[in-house]
């Protein structure tokens, strides 16, 4: 390993300080545990603080400087940037009319009785 490579590795793992994250309940419970675990493994000297809040309050936390970044399912904010795509899956019993369709939409659900 060259001295330059060693220096780059040291810089990569030497991030310190606190990263304050505000996230909606779904993201806090379903997505961030794995992300934060990997982030902590890569930057062990960084302190991570997670605040779980309704999406409607996340922007307020950012504006009041109580959070550094926010994560929400809502994307109607002008300053938001998507960082991942989510996929919703539909499961049905074998006797349900949608069970044998190759693909379904939300309209299919609305029209089933």
Image (cartoon, rainbow, N blue to C red):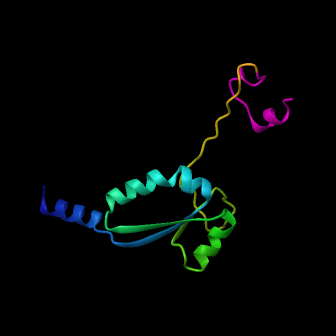
110 inside magenta stretch? yes
Residue 43 is situated, as x and y percent measured from the top left of the image, at 33, 62
Name which residue lies at 45% across and 51% down. Answer: 34
Q: Quadrant of the C terminus?
A: top right
Farthest left residue in view: 2
Residue 88 versus residue 8: which sits nearer the camera?
88
Judged from this view, the residue extending furthest toward the bottom is: 64
Query: Residue at 66% of width from left, 67% of height from top?
Result: 78
48 sits to left or right of 96:
left
Q: Residue at x 61, y 64 (%)?
A: 80
Q: Does the magenta-highlighted stretch encompass residue 106?
A: yes
Q: Residue 111 placed where, x, y %?
A: 85, 32
Classify the position of the N terminus by image quarter.
bottom left
**How many numbered marks are there?**
0
**Where residue 8 appears, x then y in whole percent?**
23, 63
Q: Is residue 61 left or right of residue 14?
A: right
The magenta region covers 96-113
Apparent side of residue 34 relative to residue 42 in the rendered image (left or right) = right
Residue 40, x across and y down, in percent: 36, 59
Identify which residue, 90 or 84, lies in the foreground. 90
Report whether 57 appears left or right of 47. Answer: right
Above or below 73: residue 51: below
70, 7: nearer the viewer? 70
Main secondary-structure element of the magenta-colored stretch: loop
- The image quadrant that residue 75 belongs to is bottom right
């Amino acid at each position: 390993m060259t001295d330059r490579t060693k220096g780059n590795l040291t810089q990569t793992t030497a991030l310190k300080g606190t990263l304050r994250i505000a996230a909606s309940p779904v993201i806090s419970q379903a997505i961030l545990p794995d992300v934060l675990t990997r982030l902590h493994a890569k930057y062990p000297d960084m302190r991570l603080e997670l605040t779980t809040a309704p999406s409607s309050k996340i922007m307020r936390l950012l504006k009041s400087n109580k959070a550094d970044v926010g994560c929400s399912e809502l994307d109607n904010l002008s300053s938001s940037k998507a960082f991942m795509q989510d996929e919703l899956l539909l499961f049905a019993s074998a006797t349900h009319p949608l069970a044998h369709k190759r693909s379904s939409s939300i309209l299919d659900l609305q029209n089933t009785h």
